[in-house]
Image (cartoon, helix red, strand yellow):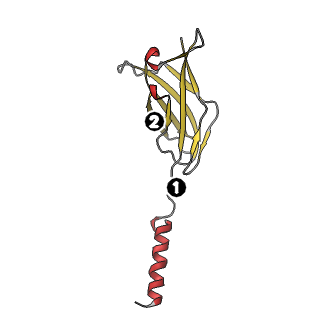
């Protein structure tokens, strides 16, 4: 095999491995790291998910640029988790707590963060811990 042909193949392989051969525009997702607790509004004391009757927490992320909504669901008892993969952008974020009644589609508590949060390629953005205040 000639040196010229070998160099040509090495160059093509390099382009392919660097992503240019695959379009080169694919961006790697980022993630949000979330955490929550539940507080009794009367006593100010923390409550367990079981005591509060909350089974699931849903994270709703709205991409400000595209308007796309991406949801992640967590078991309440986990107290937090990592979101589904998110395209790099800025997101408005809301949390919803659902009770054990699967027939009730309405959350028993919600929390909407007042500012947008950036998600960068190949990174995890830490959000502040939110508190669901229950009566």
First in sequence: mark 1 vs mark 2: 1
Residue furthest to the bottom: 2
**Label 2 SS:** strand
Please tell me which residue is depicted at 56% across the width and 51% down the height of the picture. 121
Q: Position of residue 22 (x, y in %)?
A: 45, 65
Q: Position of residue 14 (x, y in %)?
A: 49, 73
Compared to residue 111, the image places residue 20 above or below, namely below
Please tell me which residue is depicted at 53% across the width and 23% down the height of the picture. 110
Q: Quadrant of residue 119?
A: top right
Q: Position of residue 6 (x, y in %)?
A: 44, 85
Compared to residue 69, the image places residue 106 above or below, namely above
Q: Quadrant of residue 34?
A: top right
- Left or right, 77 with respect to 45, comes to left
In front of the other: 133 or 24: 133
Compared to residue 5, the image places residue 89 above or below, namely above
Q: Is residue 96 visible?
A: yes
Q: Position of residue 133 (x, y in %)?
A: 56, 17
Compared to residue 129, the image places residue 87 above or below, namely below
Pointers 1 and 2 in contact (C-beta within 8 Å): no
Q: Which residue is mark 2?
A: 72
In front of the other: 89 or 44: 44
Q: Which residue is mark 1?
A: 27
**Label 1 SS:** loop
Residue furthest to the left: 103
Q: Is residue 64 visible?
A: no
Please tell me which residue is depicted at 44% across the width and 32% down the height of the picture. 73
């Amino acid at each position: 095999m000639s040196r010229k042909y070998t160099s040509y193949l090495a160059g093509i392989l390099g382009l392919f491995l660097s992503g240019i051969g695959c379009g080169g525009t694919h961006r790697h997702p980022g993630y949000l790291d979330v955490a929550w607790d539940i507080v009794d509004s009367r006593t100010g004391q923390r409550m367990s998910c079981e005591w509060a009757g909350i089974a699931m927490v849903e994270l709703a992320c709205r991409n400000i640029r595209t308007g796309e909504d991406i949801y992640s669901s967590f078991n309440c008892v986990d107290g937090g988790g990592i979101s589904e993969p998110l395209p790099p952008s800025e997101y408005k974020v809301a949390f919803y707590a659902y009770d054990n009644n699967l027939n009730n589609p309405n959350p028993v508590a919600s929390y909407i963060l007042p500012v947008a949060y950036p998600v960068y390629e190949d990174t995890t953005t830490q959000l502040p811990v939110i508190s669901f205040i229950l009566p």
